[in-house]
Image (tube, rainbow, N blue to C red):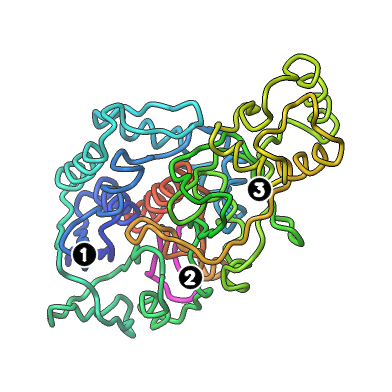
Amino acid sequence: MKQRRSVVVGGGAAGFFAAIACAEAAPGHEVLLLERGPDFLAKVRISGGGRCNVTHDCFDPRGFVTRYPRGGRELLGPFQRFQARDTVAWFAARGVELKAEPDGRMFPVTDSSQTIVDCLLLAARQAGVQTRTNCGVAGVTRRAQGGFDLQLTNGDRLECDQLLLATGGSRTAAQGALAVALGHTLEPPVPSLFTFQVQSPLLAGLAGVAVDPVELTVPGTALRERGPLLVTHAGLSGPAVLRLSAWGARWCAEVKYQFSLRVNWLPAFTSATLAAEFQARRQTQGARSVVNSPIAPIPARLWERLVLAAGVPGAQRWAALSRPAQAALIRQLLGAELPVAGKTLNRDEFVTCGGVRLREVNFKTMESRICPGLFFAGEVLDIDGVTGGFNFQSAWTTGWIAGRAMAGA
């Protein structure tokens, strides 16, 4: 009897997890994993600053799916079967312990992504997965009798009974060509999880300054995020910006990344409580200059810029702060307007929104509803999460489900 062959296209997180799951569940099944580039798991290797944010320590599937601007509803069922707790257990069973940081992100205790890469490579080898680098798929056709004919980028041809596409985000239409060739529709790909380019005198020379928390809003939209903010040479970054970019990915693309961003530097205060704080300072610190008296958590250098931007003179003392000056400073602290004039991407690590249309996929098996024998996993789907380990978790989950479905488990 001919041995069944499953081919996984894409040697990233989702592809490896799918190949391992398939090979472990069906030891007699030939599983071949193809990677177009020279290295497997390249994105895993660089993620999280080289530490690899494997998942997030939210172990409630209903809470977990709220972190996906696109795909959360579809992922609820899959997360009931394989969620973050299962990811922790999967790696622990293979000798890799994960730790949770205060913000919920989970990393290997070694703080090295190489630990995750080595674990996946070893698990694939032990399961009998065949692997090839520098070997992509240039074209695919479905055979009338079932299965697929693949044309490889090295000129070879390959037949398989089942095909899983885990090719990552479709940053261009060409990268989704295999799915389209087999009858699928792509939602237009646009970047998600990007930072904002901002040229403003308020931020000039302040690269490296961080504030935690701030609240960001985009006037005229429902976009709102609270969390840490980092000033960079190009503008603004940090979790608050990245989350806002994820939820607003399509809108930002529509306005060509040109919009006004409102920053509340002191979200713990209201106008009234901030006015009360100023009055207290008039009474207790009247002789001190306003510009040299920051309110936590605003760093001193940024506070000075905000005070001057509000029109308060550098020599102004608290005791002599006028009501109009106070009102101007409160407006600056609770609603500074900054012009966003573009985006900045980590070329290798960034996430895309867009990909294979979700209603064309059966999320119980990750099999195509259009082309029997075709499966999907990871970012090739129109799924993307906010920063914090959510994109990797969707890769592990969809890969695990697809791999086991191909194995008939």
Q: Position of residue 259 (x, y in %)?
A: 64, 65
Could you tell me which residue is drawn at 20 percent across and 61 percent down? Answer: 32
Mark nearest the camera among 2 and 3 is: 3
Q: Position of residue 280 (x, y in %)?
A: 80, 19
The magenta-colored residue range is 365-378
Q: Nearer the viewer, residue 170 or 244?
A: 244
Q: Label 3 belongs to which residue?
A: 216
Q: Label 1 belongs to which residue?
A: 34
Label 3 CA crowd tier, 10 Å (few <14, some 14–19, many 20+): many
Q: Which callout, 2 or 3, points at the residue further toward the start of the chain? A: 3
Quadrant position of residue 100: top left
Q: Secondary structure at mark 3?
A: strand
Mark count: 3
Q: Position of residue 79 (x, y in %)?
A: 52, 44
Residue 155 in the figure: left or right of residue 331: left
Q: Secondary structure at mark 1?
A: strand
Does the magenta portion include 343? no
Which amino acid does the dot numbered 3 rest on? Leu
Which amino acid does the dot numbered 1 rest on? Leu
